[in-house]
Image (tube, rainbow, N blue to C red):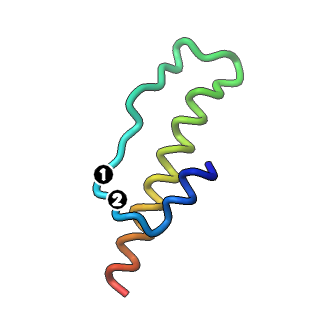
Amino acid sequence: MQILRALHGINLVGCDVVEANPLYDGPGQITALMAATVMAELMALLASQRAQAKG
């Protein structure tokens, strides 16, 4: 998370989460949760970048 948040200010053009298979996840589903969290951070980074471009 620290690495993703340190990317603030980078010219991010696109992003994706390549693979997360919750079928092999344990009862806590930490893999699926981490994939969703990473994608949410990346979307926030893109939104921040677009807000800066408008303002």
| Image mark for residue 14 | 1
Residue that appears at 34% across and 59% down? 12
Q: CA distance from mark 1 to mark 2?
A: 6 Å
Residue that appears at 71% across and 24% down? 28
Determine crowd level at label 1: few under 14, some 14-19, many 20+ residues with C-alpha closer than 10 A: few
View extreme (right): residue: 28
42 shown above or below 23: below
Residue that appears at 52% across and 53% down? 41
| Image mark for residue 26 | none
CB atoms of marks 1 and 2 within 8 Å: yes
The quarter of the rendered structure image containing the C terminus is bottom left
Q: Which residue is mark 2?
A: 12
The x, y position of residue 2, in whole percent, is 63, 52
18 shown above or below 48: above
20 shown above or below 39: above
Q: Nearer the viewer, residue 12 or 43?
A: 12
Q: Secondary structure at mark 1?
A: loop
In the visual, does 1 lie left or right of 48?
A: right
Residue that appears at 54% across and 52% down? 4
The x, y position of residue 53, in whole percent, is 33, 79
Q: Amino acid at mark 2?
A: Leu
